[in-house]
Image: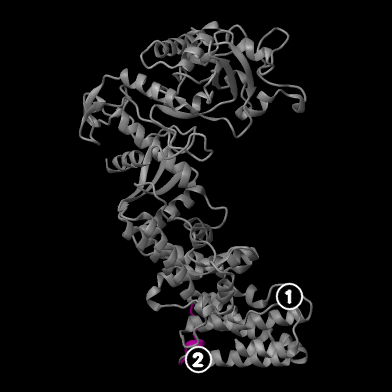
Amino acid sequence: MSWIYKLYETYEQCAGHGDLSDSAPSLEPICHTSQQAHIEVSIDENGNFLRANVIPKGQGVTLVPCTEASVGRSGSKPINHPLCDKLQYLAGDFIRFGGVVTSGFAGEPTEPHKTYLSQLSDWANSSFSHPKIIAIQTYVQKGNLIGDLVREEILPINENGQLLAAWVGDKKEAPAIFGIMPNGNSPDGAVIRWRVEIPGEPLPETWKDQRLMDAWIGFYSSQKDSKGLCLVTGDILNLAEQHPAKLRHGADKAKFISSNDTSGFTFRGRFIDADQACGVSFEVTQKAHNALRWLIARQAYRNGDQAVVAWAVSGKRIPDPLANSFDLFGIPSDESEAKQDHVNPSGAGQAFGQRLAKKLAGYRVELGSTNEIVVMGLDSATPGRMAITYYRELDRSEFLDRIEAWHKDYAWHQNYSKDIKFVGAPAPKDIAEAAFGRRLDEKLRKATVERLLPCIIDGQKIPRDLVESIVRRVSNRVGLEHWEWEKYLGIACALFSGYHKKRDYKMALELNRTSRDYLYGRLLAIAENIEDRALYVGGEKRDTSAAKLMQRFADHPFSTWKTIELSLSPYKTRLRSKRPAFLAVMESQLDDVVNLFQADDFMEDRKLSGEFLLGYHCQRQTLRTKPETEQDENSEITAAETN
């Protein structure tokens, strides 16, 4: 039960830090849940109707009181919330206007309203009452809610005085209620929230009134009498009968703990009743699940039903373990520093390491003495059951050290787009796309992220098959769009160099590295540069032979190099007449690289490893000049000699 205790602790330390008026996700009080409201009804302190309006899209999320049964309601007879809910519960004239109740209430269509009114009256007449609750009770007892909404032209009716279920005319002329109901649902399923305007009361909104929330918590807690041993705190407390859902979104029905299946085999055969299997107090489970819901909404990585969240129990800010270096640490703090990384790639790794250390030092100071950090992954295989797929508890230093190691070991020049170029580690979701394609199956994406989590958090080695898969896809250059290939090339280099970190690859061209695969990568980059410059001089725009033959070159380098070298002849002829100095430098570099091969390495035709991409990338970066503008002979010679 470690996970639920850590979430409970998080709630206790973070409760009260948020503001209910903020648009950011807030830490919900116990006995409350978020509901999407569609209509706002205003009444006065005496329960008289004042006005109503349709809530604009994006403004309807409302904090409402709930019970254990209502927050996890489902089936044909859903349990009502005690204050804000659908019209079938709140409106005494719902049936008179043709409203259709859910199927379980068909035999007794007035039952939902009677149950709601009975519960509301119990609250209003208790010692935990509140002036706004008394006003709402007085208004609801009149049974005129639908009639008032029809008179205000919120709910449209037909010629027989029955609620319209759908709009058949011009959509532009449709009443506003049809525009906000989800999936084209009938307006009779609209959810109501209340405003009670009392003289001298600055906050008429019931969902923002802290005193009203406390009143409901006190009333509902006083109704519970199921005492037992809470396995989380070790105290005798009121035990939870049901545990919350709605963890990832408002329609999420999956639960971690489910013990209300008295007819199935959830606990039968092992225990007499559910509390013997697992006893968790009502307050603990409410606070723990509310904390998790808040953390997921605020800072989790989401991919379909999968969610991964990392947090400090103290509530202080920590780095996101699943973000890339750009999103996590930002661009260089100084424009001149960013420019220096581009001009002098050999110092890029050192500069990035310094920026990384500074950023993480800031986190260390901010976290202070905080020693409890939790990383949790969750997913659901079925709509009703949630599972914890990954769970780690770490202290501050251990967590930050592993984040630093991941971003340092797997750092490389990344080229995500025209505007996003950075030195650092890629994000797991980008690694999954690089390995299996942008249109990969959701299950495969989730599985890949789960496999990478231990590499980041536990310091494990990245799976070899992922590295090889990305290298193969990047080698097949013609199968990818140009921007896509550029992005995946950086990811492939990052993963290969990180996987073989003992080889100590640099992010700049290593002239003294004489391994066969690295040198073949350099040859490919030089050949591509020669042809690319010749095409530019001739005003042509197309892929080079080196680009087209990259996959074949990776599989059979020696035999493919013959083809590439022969294809360079016409381009060399063109450059010899128009760019002789540039050609001379390039031919000299080709000779230098070939002379670096040891013994018979050059003539071996066995498959290249991902190391050739490192040699290719570093050599290409060193040779890169400004292809958009024509340069004179002297500037070309200077640039070539400098590189």
Q: Residue 380 appears in which quarter of the rendering?
A: top left
Q: Is residue 46 above or below residue 269?
A: above
Disc 2 on helix, strand or loop?
Answer: helix
Q: Residue at x 48, y 17 (%)?
A: 132
**Image: magenta residue range:** 599-609
Disc 1 on helix, strand or loop?
Answer: loop
Q: Residue at x 42, y 40 (%)?
A: 17
Type of the residue with mark 2: Leu
Q: Residue at x 64, y 73 (%)?
A: 548
Q: Check disc 1 and report the residue beneath it.
A: 628
Q: Residue 88 appears in which quarter of the rendering?
A: top right
Other-residue count near label 2 (Cα within 10 Å), few / some / many at <14 / 14–19 / ≥20: some
Q: Position of residue 553 (x, y in %)?
A: 57, 77
- Tell me the chief SS of the magenta region: loop
Q: Check disc 2 and report the residue beneath it.
A: 596
Q: Position of residue 295 (x, y in %)?
A: 42, 43
Q: Position of residue 290 (x, y in %)?
A: 40, 35
